[in-house]
């Protein structure tokens, strides 16, 4: 059987028709538009484009951020003498606690799981009939890159749907990093008076 792609339509001269690898689909294009022939055929109406995997890819990186928001270190200080002056500095053991390392490990695990779920999401989109979905390996760069690229391609073939993961990602980003900024400002304001010499 020929591979999937655009082929001259046997029933419509001057047109190409999409062959899905097993049978002809109802998608035609004029033969004189070669730029369209390399495009993707539209998805069937009602194709499930939002599976649970894309939501995991979009939100899983924020689990370590939630742990950061729950992290409330108790800063201890020690005095260091340098020449004739004494300076108070934060004791590193009061910052680098087991909870701190749990945050780091959760971020690494989330990174690996995001790549795995991006792979599963790509396979699921192919099963729904999407030709050449956004490649899952882009998740190695960032989940943001994968979610945006995937959403753009899905939106092209399933208009007007396809962009919901991007908007959810933007909302989570703004909310998460807004809360993280407030948390960091409060930590620094708590630390600053104690550092004065």
Image: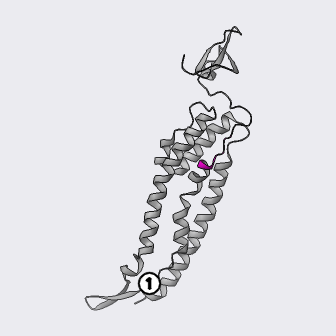
Q: Position of residue 194 (x, y in %)?
A: 45, 88
In the figure, 11 relative to 159: above or below?
above
Range covered by the magenta-colored residues: 48-53
In the figure, 51 relative to 196: above or below?
above
Q: Residue at x 59, y 45 (%)?
A: 148
Q: Position of residue 159 (x, y in %)?
A: 72, 37
**197 to the left or right of 152:** left
Q: Position of residue 119 (x, y in %)?
A: 51, 43
Q: From the image, which quarter does the N terminus lie in?
A: top right
In the figure, 23 relative to 146: above or below?
above
Q: Residue at x 52, y 38 (%)?
A: 135
Q: Residue at x 48, y 83 (%)?
A: 191
Q: Is residue 28 magenta?
A: no
Q: From the image, which quarter does the C terminus lie in?
A: bottom left
The residue furthest left is 83
Comparing 160 with 79, the one in front is 160
Which of the 4 quarters of the picture holds residue 32? top right
Chief secondary structure of the magenta span?
Answer: loop
Q: Secondary structure at mark 1?
A: loop
**178 to the left or right of 11:** left
Comparing 172 with 78, the one in front is 172
Q: Position of residue 28 (x, y in %)?
A: 69, 19
Which of the 4 quarters of the picture holds residue 66? bottom right
Residue under pointer 1 = 75
Determine crowd level at label 1: few under 14, some 14-19, many 20+ residues with C-alpha closer than 10 A: some
Comparing 67 with 166, the one in front is 67
């Amino acid at each position: 059987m020929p591979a999937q792609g655009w082929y001259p339509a046997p029933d419509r001269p001057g047109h190409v028709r999409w062959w899905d690898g097993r049978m002809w689909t109802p998608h035609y294009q004029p033969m004189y538009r070669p730029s369209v022939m390399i495009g993707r055929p539209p998805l069937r109406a009602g194709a499930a484009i939002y599976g649970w995997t894309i939501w995991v890819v979009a939100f899983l990186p924020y689990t370590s951020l939630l742990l950061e928001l729950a992290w409330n270190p108790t800063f201890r200080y020690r005095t260091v003498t340098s020449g004739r002056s004494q300076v108070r500095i934060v004791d590193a053991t009061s910052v680098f606690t087991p909870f701190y390392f749990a945050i780091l490990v959760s971020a690494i695990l989330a990174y690996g799981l995001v790549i795995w779920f991006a792979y599963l999401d790509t396979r699921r989109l192919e099963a729904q009939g999407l030709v050449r979905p956004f490649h899952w390996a882009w998740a190695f760069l960032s989940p943001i890159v994968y979610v945006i690229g995937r959403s753009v391609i899905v939106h092209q073939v399933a208009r007007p749907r396809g962009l919901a993961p991007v908007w959810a990602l933007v909302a989570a980003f703004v909310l998460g990093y807004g809360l993280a900024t407030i948390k960091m400002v409060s930590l620094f304001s708590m630390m600053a008076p104690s550092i004065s010499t």
